[in-house]
Amino acid sequence: MPEEKEKERQKGIGISRRNFLKGMGTGAVAATVAPTVLVGAPKSAEAQTSEEISRAKIKLDINNKMYEVEVEPRTTLLSVLRDGFDTSGNRVDLTGSKLICDRGECGGCTILIDGKSVYSCMTLAIDAQETKITTVEGIADGDQLHPVQEAFVQHDALMCGFCTPGFIVSAKSLLDENSSPSLEEIKEGLSGNICRCGTYPFIFEAVKTASIKMGG
Ligand code: FES
Ligand code: FES
């Protein structure tokens, strides 16, 4: 029978899918977070079900503010930013990063982790512990817009604006690494972001203007 054959096959490789998932969940979580269910838990790791290890409290440094949130190991950072609550029940409410493709193709969810641009839809929240996370909300200095933001306004570099936060974060990251990029370098630096409205020429001009403002 196919079922028996599958059991034999699993015996052969010494681990069942169920145990693999259990082991992976336990190991990954134990290595990266301090799950509340593990603290003082009398059961052995073997005895824990996937439900028991499915949520953990973690701390995230977002825009220089610490947030304690409870997440599942699979929870993305984008999900925490947009839809998460801290452990006091307050919404994180950082909705500047956009959920568009949810698969690392459009750049609408771009944020900075330790200064490097990443797709927050492709980043697990637990992997962002002990890093400095910067979202588009954290780029301005109080009421003073970042030069990239000012240049986007100056060049009218948006139509619907849905892609704009991701472009601004990517542009900041680019200019932090290369203060005087050529047009080709700007295009390459922003190649992970897509604008469906086709405002690319204005965006590229804005980044050039920002680079000059920033002394590049
Ligand atoms: S929503 Fe993350 S890359 Fe598109
Ligand atoms: S301005 Fe609409 S998607 Fe870029």
Image (cartoon, rainbow, N blue to C red):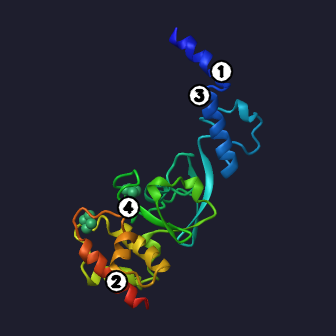
| C-alpha distance separating marks 1 and 2 | 60 Å
Examine the rendering and report whether any part of residue 199 can be seen.
Answer: yes
Label 2 near label 4: C-beta < 8 Å?
no
Residue 120, how many percent across, how many down?
46, 58
Placement of the C terminus among the 4 image quadrants:
bottom left
Circle 1 SS class: helix
Q: What element carries label 3?
A: helix
Above or below, comparing residue 80 to residue 184 in the picture: above
Q: In this view, does 158 lie to the left or right of 82?
A: left
3D distance between C-alphas at marks 2 and 3: 52 Å
Q: Mark 3 points at which residue?
A: 17
* Dot 2 or dot 3, earlier in sequence: 3
Instruction: Please give left or right for residue 20 compared with residue 163 in the image.
Output: right
The answer to whether the residue bearing label 4 lies less than 8 angstroms from the nearest atom of ligand 1 is yes
Of callouts 3 and 1, which one flags the residue occurring earlier in the amino acid sequence? 1
Gap in angstroms between the C-alphas marked 4 and 2: 20 Å
The tag earlier along the polypeptide, 1 or 4, is 1
* Three-letter residue code for mark 1: Gly
Above/below status of 194 relative to 158: above
Q: Is mark 4 on a helix, strand or loop?
A: loop
Q: What residue type is labelled 3?
A: Arg
Q: Mark 1 points at which residue?
A: 12
> Which badge, 4 or 3, is on the more N-terminal residue?
3
Tell me whether circle 4 and circle 3 mark residues in contact (CB < 8 Å): no
Q: Which residue is drawn at 57% across and 51% down?
A: 70
Q: Where residue 208 is drawn, which disc sits there?
A: 2
Question: How far apart are the alpha carbons under marks 3 and 1?
Answer: 13 Å
